[in-house]
Image (cartoon, rainbow, N blue to C red):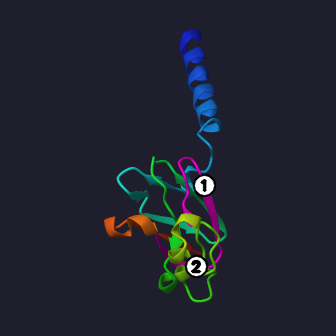
Amino acid sequence: MNAFTKLGLVMLVIGLALGACAGGDGGDDNTVAMQSGQRFEPETLTVSAGTTVTFVNDSDEGHTVTAYEEELPEGAPYFSSGGFESEDAARDDVAGGLLSTGEEFEVTFDQPGTYGYVCIPHEGSNMTGSVVVEE
């Protein structure tokens, strides 16, 4: 191997290492985006128990993250942007749960199971999603 080949190999390794260190905000695997077109991306996210998921409004519209109470694993706590204690309360005050462009909402999922959720203002457009929590 000549000196230029060795130098090229070293530069490649350094570039890959730097790329791995600079790989975004580190939360991409546990982030759900609320996007234009009234959809959650990804629609279904699978995580391990104890993971915190960040919901980020990447669109120009207000969105909510509202758990479907009937789709929570038995004994799992209720969640919604706006901090409501029930789905009925979230539906009664939609404006109180709206996330504006760039705003985030975090939920830690400790209990295994499937958690269904909806954006209330865009439920008619089928803006729904789920988080599957594995042990």
Q: Quadrant of the N terminus?
A: top right
Element at label 2: loop
Magenta region includes residue 111: yes
Magenta region includes residue 128: no
Would residue 82 be found to the left or right of residue 36 on screen? right
The residue mark sitting in front, 1 or 2, is 1
Furthest toward the top, the residue is: 3
Residue 59 in the image: above or below residue 128 = above
Residue 7: image x %, image y %?
A: 60, 15
| Residue type, label 1 | Glu
- The residue range painted magenta reads 97-118
Residue 64: image x %, image y %?
A: 51, 64
Element at label 1: strand
Residue 112: numbered disc: 2
Looking at the image, which is closer to me, 4 or 36? 36
| Residue type, label 2 | Pro
Query: Residue sitting at 62 percent across and 83 percent down?
Result: 76
Query: Residue sitting at 39 percent across and 50 percent down?
Result: 36
